[in-house]
Image (cartoon, helix red, strand yellow):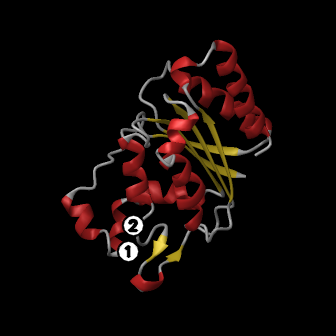
Amino acid sequence: MRILYVYCHPLDDSFHAAIRHDALAGLAEAGHAVDLLDLYDEDFDPVLTAVRRRDYHDAVRNRANNQAYVDRLMAAEALIIQFPTWSFGPPAMLKGWFDRMFGPGIAMDLSDPGRAKPLLTHITRISGISTYGRPRWQAIAMADPPRKVITRYLPWFTGSRARVRYHALYHMNTATAVRRARFLAKVRREMARF
């Protein structure tokens, strides 16, 4: 399977780097072809500039403004998004990628605004991998927006056909070495089954 693996963390020596390492190892064990999109390493520009905003509802121009990333998204059969949860949301870099990639002419047809149509029907699987500094109960109290983005919002663009999984390590700030190691093993195991 061709997988677009969107990675969003600024530090190459972080726990997220270890998660990415084990996730990619699991995907390799399963024989998947992975296109690693490291938003920080590739200097992705998350800003929706005035020009991009004006072009947003013009499907042809919106797509052209994002073509290099659109090509990678369109080539994928599955999507994996890995990110830390900061302030109960994804990092601004990833939010900008969502804003640019899941718009008209790319992920949806808005030619009839009353009946938007999904365009990513070739994506059959979506997986999210995230860490939170807070415990799960606090994320639930805030309605856990990152989980909802991965499990509810993104699948709509596939025509709600994609199989979705979400892997989260909550209360990262107090996670012991044993708990972190268990999470790494779980991610690798789940990616090997992906």
Give coordinates of residue 77: x percent, y percent. 66, 58
Query: Who's the residue at 68% across and 26% down the image?
Result: 184
Neighbours of disc 2 within 10 Å: few (<14), some (14-19), many (20+): many
Distance of label 2 from label 1 (alpha carbons): 6 Å
Q: Nearer the viewer, residue 193 or 129?
A: 129
Question: Is residue 111 at least partly visible in the picture?
Answer: no
Q: How many numbered discs? A: 2
Neighbours of disc 1 within 10 Å: few (<14), some (14-19), many (20+): some
Judge whether 176 appears above or below 69 on screen: above
Q: Which residue is mark 1?
A: 59
Query: Who's the residue at 67% across and 20% down the image?
Result: 179
Judge whether 158 appears above or below 30 on screen: below
Question: Is residue 94 at least partly visible in the picture?
Answer: yes
Q: Which residue is mark 2?
A: 63
Tell me if label 2 and label 1 are in contact, CB under 8 Å.
Answer: yes
Give coordinates of residue 168: x percent, y percent. 61, 36
Judge whether 193 appears above or below 134 on screen: below
| Three-letter code, disc 1 | Ala
Dot 1 falls on a residue whose secondary structure is helix
| Three-letter code, disc 2 | Arg
Q: Nearer the viewer, residue 121 or 168?
A: 168
Dot 2 falls on a residue whose secondary structure is helix
